[in-house]
Amino acid sequence: MTSPTMKVWLAVGGLALGALSACGPSKELRQVRAEAKSLREEASTLRAEGRGLRAENATLKTKVRALEDDLEELTRERDELKLAASKPAPAPSKKAGRK
């Protein structure tokens, strides 16, 4: 539902636009159209940049996941090596036939 105030503003806007378009392409109308075109082009450029940034973000997230997996594997390997290093070395066995 539109309020009475909203209806009034819509009517005023319609009359103003009607008056502008009825007079033919005025200087103000040309300026507004040029500005609208410029804004559409800017919006298109920003959308393209956004798509590029989203693609780059996805690539970086994939790299981060791979690095996290590598870190987890290296941490596990480090812990295994620490555990192996903390065990005492086996005592050398005496070989038979030696004096």
Image (spheres, rainbow, N blue to C red):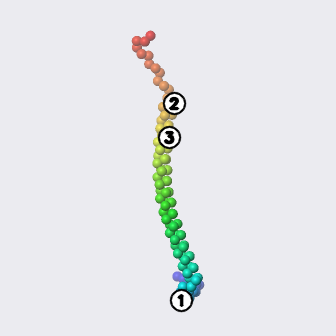
Labels 1 and 3: the sequence-earlier one: 1
Which residue corresponds to the image point at 47% horizontal and 44% vertical from the top-left? Answer: 70
Classed neighbour count for the residue bearing mark 1: other residues with Cα under 10 Å, few (<14), some (14–19), many (≥20): few
Q: Is residue 14 visible?
A: no
Look at the numbered disc 2 and give the secondary structure of its residue.
helix
Look at the numbered disc 3 and give the secondary structure of its residue.
helix
Label of residue 12 in the image: none
Which residue does the numbered mark 3 point to in the structure image? 75
Q: Nearer the viewer, mark 2 or mark 3?
A: 3
The vertical placement of 98 against 7, above or below, is above
Tell me which amino acid carries mark 3: Thr
- Left or right of 61? Residue 4 is right
Label of residue 22 in the image: 1
Check whether the beta carbons of the residues at disc 1 and disc 2 lie within 8 A of each other: no
Q: Nearer the viewer, mark 1 or mark 3?
A: 1
Labels 1 and 2: the sequence-earlier one: 1
Tell me residue 76's x, y (percent). 48, 40
> What whole-number distance in Å separates the C-alpha atoms at marks 2 and 3?
16 Å
Which is nearer the eye, 12 or 19?
19
> What whole-number distance in Å separates the C-alpha atoms at marks 1 and 3?
76 Å
Residue at the outermost top position: 99
Q: Nearer the viewer, mark 1 or mark 2?
A: 1
Which is nearer the eye, 61 or 7?
61
Which residue corresponds to the image point at 50% horizontal and 57% vertical from the top-left? Answer: 57
Tell me which amino acid carries mark 1: Ala
Which residue does the numbered mark 2 point to in the structure image? 86
